[in-house]
Image: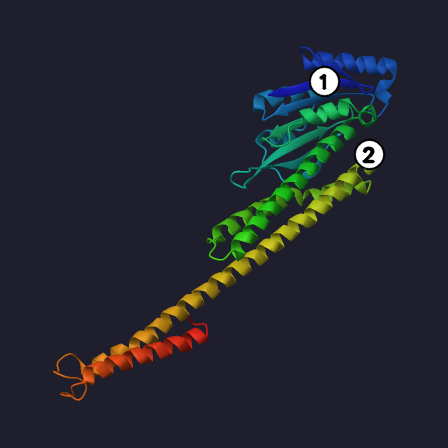
């Protein structure tokens, strides 16, 4: 569905009423008359869609002459972050992230941006990063709107990358909680939780890592359409590289937490085995003595020795206490 549509002429919003084609044609004619068409951000249309159907997007595709392959990608989603050129149109894809507090899951969505000389089309999939606040921010900043479609793309990327930082912080909090659980005496087995969070971190990395070379291409001036806004994209790249380093650190820290957890579990199992072995050694003493003499004699030991039974019991208790004290002194019990 179309969430919002407007024409921006020299930093001023003009809401489109009715047919997009008629409104856009009228805006182009007015821009040509006033000379705004010759300015980088003089006059352009911005159409925002959320999870459109093929039929809905087909109307926009036909009006703006978008490439069929790019249009198909925009409708079907599930693309990796990239920047592609189709004739005079740039097709930009970036991933959005939503952190779920209850489950610590990271849901991944997508935003596709078509950038032409006098139009921008944004297609959003998933719940992440609604673009309403981005549009309001741009409309309150005429200097940024002066950059035209490049300014819109910058604002969208800036919003998404800033949210990466928020998600990274939430992941860090989860890792701290896991560390506390691992080193808490008698704590629960959190192996599954560690693996689950590690999987989310890897999904985080697959969402943001491919965006780094894309922004580097823009910053290096290899995309002429964005040459006037390179300093803005350089700022986004700095933020993204910082998040990229944090995600790598999270992944390494989770590896360390998992190693420590498995080591502590192994240590606990060894301690349990030592205790079992210790009690088995203690029980072996009376078992051995009882096995020698059995229960078939009137007096024990040496058949008819009157005090034999009591002596054997004393010897059993003495040996058991001695073995227990020795094992306890060596921290086996």
Q: Is residue 237 shown above or below 148?
A: below
Residue at the extreme right: 35
User: Can I make out residue 238 in this image?
Assistant: yes
Which numbered disc, 1 or 2, marks the residue that appears first in the sequence? 1
Q: Nearer the viewer, residue 142 or 147?
A: 142
Please say if 213 is above or below 276: above
Residue 75 lies, in percent from the top left, at: 59, 29
Residue annotated with mark 2 = 229
Q: What is the tally of numbered marks visible in this picture?
A: 2
Whether label 1 touches label 2, CB < 8 Å: no
> Regarding mark 2 in the picture, which secondary structure is present there?
helix
Cα–Cα gap, marks 1 and 2: 22 Å
Give the residue drawn at x 32%, y 80%.
Answer: 318
Residue designated by label 1: 6
Which picture quadrant has residue 225? Answer: top right
Tell me: 93 left or right of 174. right
Instruction: Give 48 or 253, whichever is nearer the viewer.
Output: 253
The answer to whether 145 appears left or right of 325 in the picture is right
Residue 256 at what x, y percent from top left? 58, 58
Q: Nearer the viewer, residue 127 or 2?
A: 127
The quarter holding residue 22 reads top right
Q: Specify whether 310 is left or right of 141.
A: left
Choose top left, top right, bottom left or bottom right for residue 171.
top right
Whole-percent x, y for residue 106 in the image:
57, 40
The mark found on residue 311 in the picture is none
Q: Please say which color scheme the image uses.
A: rainbow
Can residue 224 be seen here? no
């Amino acid at each position: 569905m179309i969430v919002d549509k407007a024409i921006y002429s020299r930093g001023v919003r003009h809401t489109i009423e009715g047919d997009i084609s008629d409104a856009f044609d009228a805006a182009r004619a007015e821009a040509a008359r006033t000379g705004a068409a010759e300015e980088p951000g003089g006059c352009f249309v911005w159409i925002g869609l959320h999870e459109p159907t093929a039929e809905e997007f087909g109307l926009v595709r036909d009006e703006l002459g978008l490439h069929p392959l790019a249009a198909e990608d925009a409708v079907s989603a599930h693309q990796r972050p990239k920047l592609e050129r189709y004739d005079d149109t740039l097709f930009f894809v970036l991933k959005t992230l939503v952190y779920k507090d209850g489950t610590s899951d990271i849901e991944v969505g997508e935003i596709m941006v078509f950038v032409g000389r006098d139009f921008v089309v944004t297609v959003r999939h998933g719940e992440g990063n609604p673009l309403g606040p981005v549009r309001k921010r741009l409309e309150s900043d005429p200097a940024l709107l002066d950059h035209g479609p490049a300014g819109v793309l910058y604002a969208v990327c800036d919003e998404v990358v800033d949210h990466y930082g928020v998600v990274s912080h939430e992941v860090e909090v989860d890792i701290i909680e896991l560390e506390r659980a691992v080193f808490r005496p008698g704590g629960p087995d959190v192996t599954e939780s560690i693996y689950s969070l590690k999987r989310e971190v890897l999904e985080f990395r697959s969402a943001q890592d491919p965006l780094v070379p894309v922004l580097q291409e823009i910053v290096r001036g290899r995309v002429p359409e964005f040459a006037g806004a390179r300093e803005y994209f350089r700022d986004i790249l700095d933020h993204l590289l910082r998040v990229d380093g944090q995600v790598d650190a999270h992944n390494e820290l989770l590896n360390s937490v998992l190693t420590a957890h498995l080591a502590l579990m192994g240590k606990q199992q060894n301690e349990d085995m030592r205790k079992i072995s210790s009690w088995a050694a203690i029980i072996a003493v009376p078992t051995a003595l009882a096995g020698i003499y059995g229960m078939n004699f009137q007096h024990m030991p040496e058949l008819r020795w009157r005090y034999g039974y009591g002596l054997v019991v004393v010897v059993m208790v003495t040996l058991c206490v001695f073995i227990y004290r020795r094992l306890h002194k060596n921290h086996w019990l």
